[in-house]
Amino acid sequence: MTRITLEQVVANVRDLPTLPLIVTELIATFDQADVSTSELAAKVSKDQALTAKTLRLANSSFYGLQCKVRTIEQAIAVLGFDSVRALVTSAGIIGAFGGAGAAGFDFAKFWRHAVGTALCAKSLARLTGRNQEFAFVSGLLHDIGRLVLVTICPKEYDEAIAYRAAHDCEMMAAEREVLSIDHAVVGRALAEHWKFPELIRRAIANHHAPAGQDLGDIASVVHVADAIVHALDLAGQDDERVPAVVQGAWDSLRIDAAGLRRVFADTESEFDNACQILIASH
């Protein structure tokens, strides 16, 4: 076993890719009630790549707009600041992480699963009356701790990948066995470093086993979305495993069969388009 402590992870977080300044500023607004949307829109517009991705997503069928939006200001006016903030934040984080890391880690498939979970979590949140944008961002980042481990200890993470294959177990169990730490704990540490609100931190930390205050909240939404996207095999993994769903988390969302079919349809219909926009360069 190679013991990786949380203190070592935190110490190496500063070596991770730097987020665009506008993304850092947007993250800081998640817990703010009074935000100057015009000022932030002007800053986003200066980043042409982020603006282009955001507008392509805003104009995709996922939002069902009747007219095309051509500027960030128009997108905010039509979709609302929260939706645009979630899109810009997501695009910025994906763009910041390149493809260097453990040899056995597939970045493209990682992000495909992340995007699928984000879409599914947003659809579930819409169905169940939860915050859709928090669900989208939490779904996208639920496995972000894996990227941290792949980046700061690639050799050891390759050993964890090999252990998982040899023992046919969940990746989380392999991480704990080989590294003595798992991606959920590491993901929360990164979310704290990036200063995301507590609700998103909890969703990342507890997406495998929501309990207590997480029941019926974003962590439960992401937990169920993660399982659904694994079941749909949207990432195209050769050794796909569907994680067990915590009964209490499932029950807390009160989803009926018709609603679940709608979530499946929404997620699958928008998946390829969202991947083409968000992760084309990975």
Image: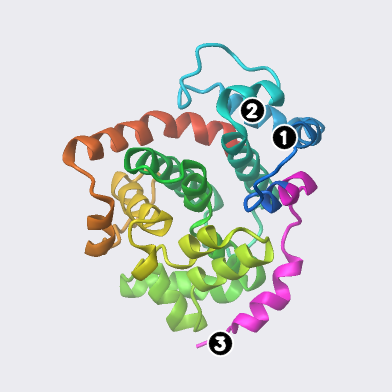
Residue type, numbered disc 2: Ile
Q: Name the residue under label 2.
A: 76
- Residue 180 is left or right of residue 86, and the answer is left
Looking at the picture, how far across and down is residue 127, in whole percent? 33, 38
Q: Mark 3 points at which residue?
A: 3
Q: Hey, which quadrant is residue 282 in on the image? A: top right
Residue located at (42% from left, 54% from top):
218
Circle 1 packing at 10 Å, graded few (<14), some (14-19), many (20+), is some
Q: Taken as a whole, is the magenta stretch helix, strand or loop?
A: helix
Looking at the picture, how far across and down is residue 31, in whole percent? 63, 53
Q: Name the residue under label 1.
A: 37
Residue type, numbered disc 1: Thr
Q: Nearer the viewer, mark 3 or mark 2?
A: 2
Q: Check the image and report above or below for 186 versus 59.
A: below
Element marked by disc 3: loop
Element marked by disc 2: helix
Which stretch did the figure color magenta? 1-25
Which numbered disc, 2 or 1, marks the residue that appears first in the sequence?
1
Give the residue furthest to the front.
Answer: 34
Distance in Å between CA atoms under marks 2 and 1: 8 Å
State if disc 1 and disc 2 touch (CB < 8 Å).
Answer: yes
Residue located at (33% from left, 62% from top):
215
Q: Check the image and report above or below for 247 versus 162.
A: above
Residue located at (64% from left, 44% from top):
89
Element marked by disc 1: helix
